[in-house]
Structure formats: C-alpha cells, structure tokens
Image: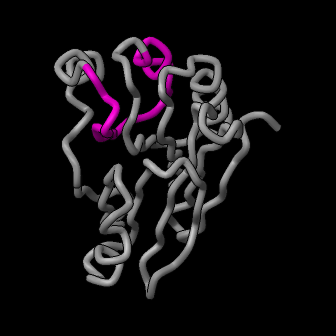
C-alpha cells in the first residue's frame, strides 16, 4: 500500500493542489496530514483526493469545528493512533516526544510535522517520518512524503521539481 504524507500546508493552495495531483497521479491509497492546515477552505482542494484521508490538528489550526466538519470527521486530536495496512501508526504534530514514542517499540511508524524540515529515519525498528512543509512558507521548499507500507520505505518528494 502506498501512502502520501503531508504537513504544514498553511493555506498554500498552489502547493496543496500540487500535492493532491501528485498523490492522485501516483495512485496513493491513503493520505495522512500531520497538522497545520490552518483554514477550513483547504478542504476544497483536499476533497479532490481519490483515496481515504486521516489528519490531526496542528498548533496553527484556527477554526477546528469547521475543519472537522469540512473533513467529514477525519481530523483528530493528537496523538492519533491508527492502523494502516497492518502497520501501527502514531500521528502527531509537534516533535517533542517522537523519539520516546519510537523507543517504546509500540509503533511501526511515527509521523510528525511542525519543524517544517523533511526527515526519514529509523529508530530501532520504528520508521520516523516528517514530510517537511508542503506550504513552503518557512524554508521556501514545498515537500511531501510517499511511504510504501509493504516494504516500510519512505521518500521525500519536492513539489517544485
């Protein structure tokens, strides 16, 4: 199963359109958003995804009630624990407890955002992924990640390439 991972879109509709187009082109089966959509109108773009979706609230998400409504209940408070393709995933926005969660060995994958810096690494047997910032406002580079859950391999994709 191929999953798309996005975070920190921060209302950049142009980059969000590129991310959705990439995920649809690559036939991603599930998209995971690690927070900071910012405004509910981002779902006008995200509803074009041709797959299922899971997200969490970040520290910059303002109108949580409308975000929840627009996402049809698919955005959760953090940490959000769920399974996808037999893999146990913990999804959070902030990075403060990423290594502790990985050290616990309770999860196959830890996904986070907030730092706007893309990262894919292993801690023991846990895969840790930060897709970077899809919005591109902080570092000027819009990135997302693709994750092949069958082989537990992730890839950072630059949306501007």
- Residue 95 left/right relative to 136: left
Across the whole image, how many numbered discs are drawn on residues? 0
Image quadrant holding the C terminus, namely top right
Q: Residue at x 77, y 34 (%)?
A: 160
Compared to 156, does 149 lie above or below? below
Colouring scheme, one of rainbow, by chain, secondary structure, one colour: one colour
Q: Is residue 134 left or right of residue 140?
A: left
Residue 89 picture quarter:
bottom left
In the picture as drawn, the residue positioned furthest to the right comes out as: 161
Q: Residue at (38%, 65%) from the top-left corner? A: 110
In the image, which residues are magenta?
Answer: 42-62
| Position above or below: 156 against 39 | below
Q: Residue at x 61, y 31 (%)?
A: 137
**Where is residue 53, by image quadrant?**
top left
Q: In the figure, 133 relative to 17: above or below?
A: below
Magenta stretch: includes residue 10 = no
47 magenta-colored:
yes
Residue 20 % position (x, y): 58, 28
Q: Position of residue 130 (x, y in %)?
A: 51, 56
In the displayed orientation, state which residue is furthest to the bottom.
Answer: 124
Task: Residue at 21% x, 40% y: name it.
Answer: 76
Pinpoint residue 136: horizontal percent, then vertical percent: 63, 34
């Amino acid at each position: 199963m191929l999953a798309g991972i996005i975070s920190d879109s921060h209302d950049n509709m142009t980059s969000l359109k590129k991310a959705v187009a990439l995920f649809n082109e690559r036939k991603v089966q599930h998209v995971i958003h690690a927070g900071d959509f910012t405004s509910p109108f981002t779902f006008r773009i995200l509803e074009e995804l041709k797959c299922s979706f899971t997200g969490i609230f970040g520290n910059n998400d303002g109108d949580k009630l409308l975000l929840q409504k627009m996402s049809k209940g698919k955005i959760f408070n953090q940490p959000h624990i769920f399974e996808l393709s037999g893999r146990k995933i913990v999804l959070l926005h902030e990075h403060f407890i990423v290594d502790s969660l990985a050290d616990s060995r309770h999860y196959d994958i830890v996904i986070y955002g907030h730092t706007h810096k893309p990262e894919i690494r292993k801690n023991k047997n846990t895969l840790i992924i930060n897709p970077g910032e899809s919005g591109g406002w902080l570092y000027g580079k819009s990135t997302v990640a693709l994750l092949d859950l069958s082989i537990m391999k992730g890839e950072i994709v630059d949306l501007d390439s």
